[in-house]
Image (cartoon, rainbow, N blue to C red):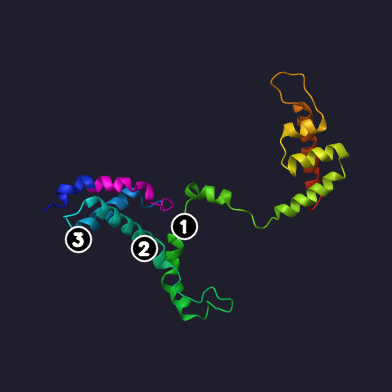
Amino acid sequence: MYSFEEKLKEIEAALERKRCKWHLDAVTYIDYDDIKQVIMTHIYKKWHLWDQSKPIEPWLSRVVSNQFKNLLRNHYGNYVNPCPDQHLSDHDPLTCPICTKWRQSKKSAYDIKLAVTMENHIHEIHARRDESIDLDEATIKLTAKIQTQLNSRQFQAYKMLFVQNKTEEEVAIFLGFKTNEKKRSAGYKQIKNLKKIFQEKAKKIIEENDII
């Protein structure tokens, strides 16, 4: 029979392999090294449950995965409002006894547990769409306004670049732009000048009109 101490290196190696599976980096007061100590203590207490006629690796992997779930639940789930009716439209959390008890006993802990750092979640904040702005409607308004300030040829270039998402080279070829410079795409200077015009006009339109 193997003792816990005899398999310590294999246990530590199994925990290191699971490091990438730990997803609570936003909580700065606990890191994976702390988690390893908690799980190793748990493995020590449950050592008698390992069937030593079988390899230890699958058993360790299952124990570690289950402990991850338990720890995550303890940090979040144990503090969530348990009221099953909280999302109903006619539900009143001020008179509901379950919600009242939760506010008095666990809400403050729930708020603390859910606090995250900007450092770990800045990508989520940047990726989140601002629902207060209808970008599609703003694009339509801007396109309609800018059409009145461009000639037909310029507006065709604008539509191809910013509405139809054509490449600069495709627009230059369509408009018949050419270049004599080597290693330069056709009409790159003309397209550059057009984009500068579009940018200046769009900026002025946005400043003077209710576009966004």
Q: Quadrant of residue 184?
A: top right
Q: Please say whether residue 24 is one of the residues in the magenta stretch.
A: yes
The residue type indicated by label 3 comes to Leu
Residue sitting at x 72%, y 38%? 166
Residue at image mark 1: 115
- Amino acid at dot 1: Ala
Q: Secondary structure at mark 2?
A: helix
Residue 44 placed where, x, y %? 20, 56
- Indicate the position of residue 112 as horizontal and vertical percent values: 44, 61
Q: Which mark is residue 180?
A: none
Dot 1 or dot 3, earlier in sequence = 3
Q: Circle 3 is placed at which residue position?
A: 49
Marked residue nearer the N-terminal end (2 or 1): 2
- 100 sits left or right of 15 in the view: right
Above or below, 107 against 150 in this view is below
Report crowding for label 3: few under 14, some 14 to 19, many 20 or more residues within 10 A (C-alpha): few
Q: Earlier in the sequence, mark 2 or mark 3?
A: 3
Q: Which residue is mark 2?
A: 74
Up the image or down, 42 lies above or below 81; here it is above
In the figure, is residue 16 to the left or right of 106? left
Q: CA distance from mark 2 to mark 3?
A: 23 Å
* Disc 2 + disc 3, Cβ < 8 Å: no
Which numbered mark, 2 or 3, is in the foreground of this view?
Answer: 3
Q: Which residues are magenta?
A: 11-27
